[in-house]
Image (tube, helix red, strand yellow):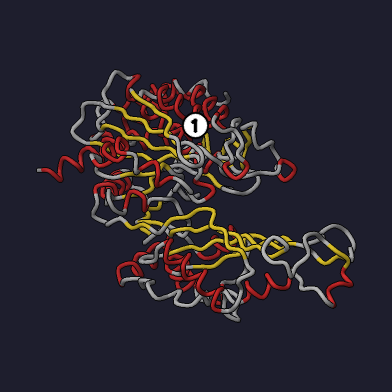
Amino acid sequence: MVRRSSRLVAVALIALAVVPVAAETPDRAEIVLTVEEQHDATVKSLQDWIALPTIAAEKLNTPQGAEYMQQLALDAGFQTAKIIPTDGLPAVFATLDAGAETTLGIYFMYDVKQFDPSEWDSHPLEGNLVERHDEGLTIVGRGAVNQKGPQTAFLAALKAIQASGRQLPVNIVLVAEGEEEIASTHFDQVVAVPEVQEALAKSIGVFIPSAAQSKDGSANITLGAKGAVEFQLVVGGETSDKYPKTDIHSSNHARIESPAWRLVKALDTLVADDGHTPAIDGWFENVRPLTDRQKQLIAEGAKLNPEDQAKELLGIGSWIDDLPYITSLERFYSQPTVNIQGLVAGYTGPGGKTILPGRAEAKLEFRLVPAMTKDEAVKKLEAHLAKRGFDDVQVTISGGYGPNETDEDSILIKAQKRLFEQNGIAYSIRPRSAGSWPGVIFNGAPLNLPASQFGLSRGGGAHAPNEWFLIESTDPKVNGLDEATMAYVDYLYLVAKEAERGTD
């Protein structure tokens, strides 16, 4: 590993001189040294995990992914780690009893998105260490930031506390699924297992490790996330006998219906003429508007995330309808969407091919906001298509869940605020993430627990080529792997302290 020779003594001095949050973390300098000593092993652990991708959509590396996750939990000190079967991919349920007064729930995902190695500069399964301009040393690979990097840092934090001869300040209940990237199709079955539900019910809340640090060192707190529903619309010989069973000569379009045109017509009814406003009947019926406080948080957050940087990151020059930046952010966090992920029909190679396609398919997703639900969205879609006579359009729901919300005054959020404030880290609070994770499974009945995201680390490229996670930062305000690990150490102690305050 590079840059290691002179850091052990320096890290201890930094731990004593710079980090005021050490007041809540006993003997913090010793834990810092342990984290540093484990650095190479932690990087190797992340590389090994990246080398084993579980891709739910392709049924790749199952059940190996769950077995690997089970062993990772045991290696991190969990006394029990069980594989929980579902109607889809299995999950892992693990418990670590530290004899503490407070129990904390942790959500992991062990699956990753698909990848095409030809699109990457560094092979997506090698976990190569690559210098990133103006950032530092990164690890590049599928799952590096979403979510194996942050999760590896969290497990490293547990190992460091225990290796330093200490008991954790909280008990841990871990649930890890292998279908997050297909919208958590069967995750509700996992939490419904009596043993799992009973263990989670004892916790003060559940959080997912994440990489929420910006390039300037500032951090983000999110109070929830949009829900997501993934589905497919198919038209073709398999859905009606008025379409050909296979591709046929295009001259037949004079007398035979085209599945491609039929699908396009159905898709066109799902949004307004502007191309982005959902037009499904009753779609906005239960959409809860932003509160004044949420609008205030969005405006404050915009100051830490300038518009020009946001546009550069996304590679665009304007927002929908040329909206002002703040208005675009309000839409970002508050608007439910109907998005086409992909369209497939007929011939797409070079030149032309005179065929009438026998099948057309669109892959779509909904993003849902409070107080919408998955069941509501699906029923409205089906009713919308049926009303317009699209009974030949097959709807297949592949996964999904509703949105989740957590109160700003919950223990999970207050501990994050305290950590950032004690360390002088600028932060913004977002009403919710515009992305999704199945926090509603914890947030909703019967558990009704706070559900949050937390991580003081940095990375990017989730779902894209060249996904990366920062290992060694060139900017002291931005965390590398070791500093991200220590942030989880500090957070666990702060959660325990906030829980103690709550019972005083």
**Residue at the outermost bottom position:** 273
Q: Nearer the viewer, residue 466 or 365?
A: 365
- In the image, 71: left or right of 24? right
Q: Is residue 490 above or below residue 68?
A: below
Question: Where on the picture, by quarter, is residue 242?
Answer: bottom right
Where is residue 244 drawn, in percent x and y? 78, 64
Camera sees residue 446? yes
In the rendered image, the vertical position of residue 346 relative to residue 451, given as above or below: below
Q: Quarter-wise, where is residue 375 in the image?
A: bottom left
What amino acid type is highlighted by mark number 1?
A: Ala
Assign the C terminus to one quadrant of the image: top left
Q: Can see residue 303?
A: no
Residue beneath the point at 63% across and 73% down:
266
Image position of 269 with respect to 412: above or below:
below
Residue 55 drawn at (x, y percent):
59, 40
The residue that appears at 28% across and 47% down in the rendered structure is 412
Q: Nearer the viewer, residue 14 or 280?
A: 280
Q: Provide the secondary structure element on which disc 1 rests.
A: helix
Q: What percent of the width, then of the height, locates residue 409?
A: 23, 55
Q: Quadrant of the N terminus?
A: top right
Residue 167 relative to residue 474: left or right: left
Quick one: which residue is furthest to the left in this view? 504
The residue where tag 1 is placed is 66
- Give percent across and percent down for residue 483: 42, 35
Badge 1 crowding class, 10 Å Cα cut-off, few under 14, some 14 to 19, many 20 or more, is: many
